[in-house]
Amino acid sequence: MDWGTRLRVATGVAYCLQHMHQLDPPMALIKLNSSAVYLTDDYAAKLSDLSFSNDIASAETRAMDKPLATPESNVYSLGVLLFEMVTGRLPYSVEHKDSLENWASHYLEVDQPLKEIVDPILVSYQEDQLEQVASLITSCVHPDPQKRPTMKDVSERLREITKITPESAVPKLSPLWWAEIEIASAEAR
C-alpha cells in the first residue's frame, strides 16, 4: 500500500474504534492488531475480533484468563498498529525474535526520528504527516493509560493529519459491500 492508502486504513480503524468506544456501554476489542483489520475492495477498514463473541459467552473464563480490554488498551494497540503501518514490520518476526510491540517501545524510548525506519517499500510519503503520525504514536503508547488520548482525540488528530472525513473512510458502494450487509442481516435473524 502507498502512504495515502495506509493513512486511509489507519483513519478508518480509528473511526470504527471511536464509534465502539462511544456506545453505552463502551465496547473495546480484545485483540486489536493487524489481523483484526479487514479491508474492503477499496481499502476501507473493517474491524473484527473473533474472540469477542466467544468471550461474551464465557465471561467468567475471560475474567480469569485474560485481562479485560478497555478503550485505553485499544488506543495503545492502535499506536502499535500505526507503528506497524509506517515501518512495514510484521507484529512478530522470527528474524528479530521479538514482538513489534517490544521493538516499538524500545525504539520510542530512545526518541529517534521515525523516518529512519519507514517501510522501504514506501517510495514517497509526506514528511510533515510522518512527523505528526510519530507524535500521535508516542501519545497512544504512553505507559500511563490515563495519559493516553481518547479514541475521539485520536480520530480528530488523524482527520487533521489526513483530511479524511468519516464519510471518506467508509467503503464505497459496491456489490460486495451490499452482499456483506445482506449476509450479516440474514445471520442476525
Image (cartoon, rainbow, N blue to C red):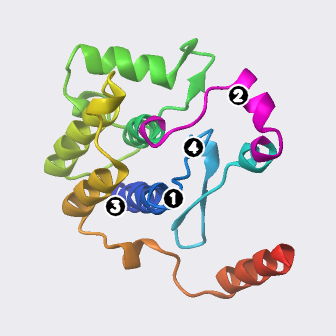
Q: Quadrant of the C terminus?
A: bottom right
Give me the residue at 51% from left, 60% from top. 24
Give me the residue at 38% from left, 38% from top. 79
Q: Is residue 62 magenta?
A: yes
Give the spatial CA distance, label 1 vs label 4: 18 Å
Residue 12 lies, in percent from the top left, at 44, 62
Give the spatial CA distance, label 3 vs label 1: 24 Å
Q: Mark 4 touching mark 2, by CB under 8 A? A: no
What amino acid type should be assigned to the residue bearing mark 3?
A: Gly
| Residue under pointer 1 | 20
| Residue under pointer 3 | 4
What amino acid type should be assigned to the residue bearing mark 1?
A: Met
Which of the marked residues, 2 or 3, is nearer the chain's N terminus? Answer: 3
Q: Residues within 10 Å of mark 3 (few under 14, many from 20)?
A: some
Give the spatial CA distance, label 4 vs label 2: 24 Å
Give the spatial CA distance, label 3 vs label 4: 18 Å
| Residue under pointer 2 | 63
**Residue placed most toward the observer, 9 or 54:** 54
Which of the marked residues, 3 or 1, is nearer the chain's N terminus? Answer: 3
The stretch in magenta equals: 55-73
| Residue under pointer 4 | 34
Residue 128 lies, in percent from the top left, at 13, 49
**Residue placed most toward the observer, 73 or 60:** 60
Left or right position of 120 against 55: left
Q: Secondary structure at mark 2?
A: helix
What amino acid type should be assigned to the residue bearing mark 2?
A: Ala
Is the magenta region chiefly helix, strand or loop?
helix
Which of the marked residues, 4 or 2, is nearer the chain's N terminus? Answer: 4
Residue 41 lies, in percent from the top left, at 60, 72
Q: As drawn, which residue projects farthest toward the left?
A: 128
Q: Secondary structure at mark 4?
A: helix
What amino acid type should be assigned to the residue bearing mark 4?
A: Ser
